[in-house]
Image (spheres, rainbow, N blue to C red):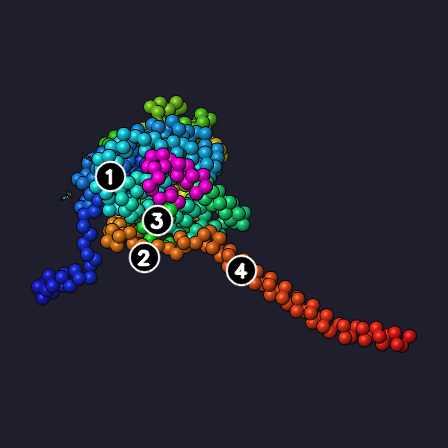
Amino acid sequence: MGALIARLPLLLLALGLWLPAPTHAARILGIFPTPSISHQLPYQAVMKELALRGHQITVISPDPLKEPVANYTDVDISFSYEYFRQVITFADMSEVDPVTMLEMMTPGFIKLVDKQLSSEQIKDFLRYNATQGFDLVFFEWWGYEAFFGLIHAVGSPPVIGILSFGGSIVQFRSIGNPHNPAVNPDVFTGFSEKMTFWERVQNLIAMVRVTRQWEGVMFHEHEKLMRKHFGSAPPPVYDTSRNLSLLILCNHWTLEYPRALLPNVLQLTGLHVREETRPLPADLQAWLDGAEQGVVYFSLGSNVMSKDLPPEKLQAILRALARLPQRVLWKFENDELPGRPPNVRVAKWLPQQDILAHPKVRLFITQGGLQSFQEAAYHAVPLLGIPFMGDQHYNVAKMVSSAIGLRLELKDITEESLYATITELLGNSGYAERMRRFSGVYREHKARSLETALWWVEYVLRHEGAPHLRAASLRLAWYELLLLDVAAAVALAALAALLLAAFALRRLWRALRPSTAPAHHARLRKDQ
Ligand SMILES: *[C@@H]1O[C@H](CO)[C@@H](O)[C@H](O)[C@H]1NC(C)=O
Ligand SMILES: *[C@@H]1O[C@H](CO)[C@@H](O)[C@H](O)[C@H]1NC(C)=O
Ligand SMILES: *[C@@H]1O[C@H](CO)[C@@H](O)[C@H](O)[C@H]1NC(C)=O
C-alpha cells in the first residue's frame, strides 16, 4: 500500500499521457430563443457547468440567470415572453393534433424570430460582442434557422444543436440519423413503439407532413428573414442546417424507446433534475406530513393553465377530487377556486421537485411535459397524463406502455372517469411497483448525463468540430437514402433482361416456325 502511494505521482503522470490534451478556456455562445422556462432549464444546466469548468459563456435567452455565475453573461431577450403570447394563442389549438399545431404556429414563430433579430439587444450584441468571435455555438435545434445569420456573423464556428425534448424526423434528418417510420414513432404523434398497421400509416404521414412544413415552408421563411437581417453573406439556411457537429437531445431511451443513434447524437436526461432536495415551506411540509392516506399532486406545467380549463371540466374535476380520501395539492393560477373541497389545497407556484420527493406523494396528475416526466421518474411517482400539445401525447404514450401511469384525454374527463382512473392508480400497487423499477433504471442514466455532455462538448472543441463524425447519409438525396435509385436501376435491368429474353424467344420461335410451318402446310397441300 505504502509503495503504491509512493508511486502515485508516477502513476498519475503515466495516466496523464493517456488523457486527452486539456481543453483551453473556449468562448462559447448559446442561442436559446424559446420563451418557455421548461426549454431553458436543461440548456442553463449545461452552460453553467461549462462556465464552472473555465469556459467563457455568452447566452442569448429570454430567461437570464437569476443568480449570476462567473464567466456567464446573458443577452436578455425576456421581452419575447409577452410578444410570444400575443402572436400565439394556445387556446385555439387545444383540439388539433400536434402536426396541425406546428403548421398553425409557424407564422407566430417567424414573427417572434423577426422581433428578436430586430431588437436592440441583438443589435448591440452584434455591434459590440460578435466581432471577437466564438469557438463554439450551442443552438436550440428548433425552428429558429434565421439565427444562422448570427452564427455566420460570429465566424461560423462549429455548432452543437440542443433540444429540450426528443427529436422529430427533422432533427434526425439534419444530422443524417436514421428515423424509421416502421419502428420509431415521431415525437409529433401519440404512438408507442408498438404500432399497428394503421398507426404506422399515420406515423409515416406525420413524418412527411412535418418534413414538408419544416424544410419546405419554414426554411423558406427563415431564408427570407435571414437575408433581411444579415444580407447575402451567410450560406443558405439548408446548408447550415446540415452542418451540425453534435446533436444533444434531452429525451432518453429510458423515457422513450431504444433506437439506432449515430455517435454524434447524444440522448441526455434529467439535466435540470436536482439530486438534493431543498426544504419546503413549513406549513406545506406539515400539511404533506399530515396526509394519512397520501397526497395527489396535480400540475399542468407552465404553458397549460389549470385556470383556463373549461368550467364544466373544472367542476367535474373538483367533484372527483372531493371523493378522494387523499389530500390533493394543485398548482392553480388563480387565488380563488370556487367549490374547492376541504382536501384540496391550491397554490400559484409550487417547488415541484421537492414535492415529488416527499414520501407521502403517491400520484402525479400531469400534462405529460418531458421535464415533469423526468422529475417523476427520478422520484418514482406514478402518473396520470392529460396530454394537451407538442410532445405530451408522445410522453404519455410511454407512461401507458410501461404501465407506470394511465392516460385520460381532456374531452373524456368526467367526475366518474377521473375518479375511477385515480382510484385504479392508487389502489393497484402494480403502478407504484413498476415505477420503482423504472426509476432505478432512469436514475442510473440521469446520473451520467451532465458528465457525458461535458466530455462531448470538449471533444468537439479539441477536434475542431469533429468532422470525422459526419454521416455519409448527409451527402445523399432522399431518394438515394431510400435506395430508390438503386431499386429503379435494378427494376430497369430486370425489365431489360425480360424484354431481351422475350425478344430472343420470339426470334427463336420465328427461326423455327418458317421451316416447320410452311413445310407442314406444304405437306397438307400435297396430301389433298
Ligand atoms: C473566468 O475566466 C477567466 C479567464 O478565463 C479566469 O481567469 C477566471 O478564473 C474565471 N473565473 C472563474 C470563477 O471561473
Ligand atoms: C458586450 O460588450 C460590452 C462592452 O465590452 C460588455 O460590457 C458586455 O458585457 C458584453 N456583453 C456580452 C453579452 O458579452
Ligand atoms: C460548417 O461548419 C464549419 C465549422 O465547423 C464552418 O467552417 C462552415 O462554414 C460551416 N458551413 C456552413 C454551410 O454553415
Q: Secondary structure at mark 4?
A: helix
- Residue receiving disc 3: 243
Q: Position of residue 146 (x, y in %)?
A: 36, 38
Which badge, 4 or 1, is on the more N-terminal residue? 1
Q: CA distance from mark 1 to mark 3?
A: 21 Å
- Residue receiving disc 2: 468
Magenta range is: 215-238
Q: Position of residue 412 (x, y in %)?
A: 49, 34
Q: Residue 358: name its quadrant.
A: top left
Residue drawn at x 62%, y 64% is 498
Q: Residues within 10 Å of mark 1 (few under 14, many from 20)?
A: some
Task: Identify which residue, 503 or 161, lies in the foreground.
Answer: 503
Q: Is residue 234 magenta?
A: yes
Residue 273, placed above or below residue 124: below
Q: Is residue 159 visible?
A: yes
Q: Nearer the viewer, mark 4 or mark 2?
A: 4
- Residue receiving disc 1: 130
Q: Residue 283: name its quadrant.
A: top left
Residue drawn at x 27%, y 32% is 123
- Residue receiving disc 4: 489
Q: Secondary structure at mark 1?
A: loop
Whether label 4 touches label 2, CB < 8 Å: no
Which badge, 4 or 2, is on the more N-terminal residue? 2
User: Does mark 3 have its CB less than 8 Å from ligand 3?
Assistant: yes
The amino acid marked with disc number 1 is: Ala
Residue drawn at x 36%, y 30% is 84
Q: Secondary structure at mark 3?
A: loop
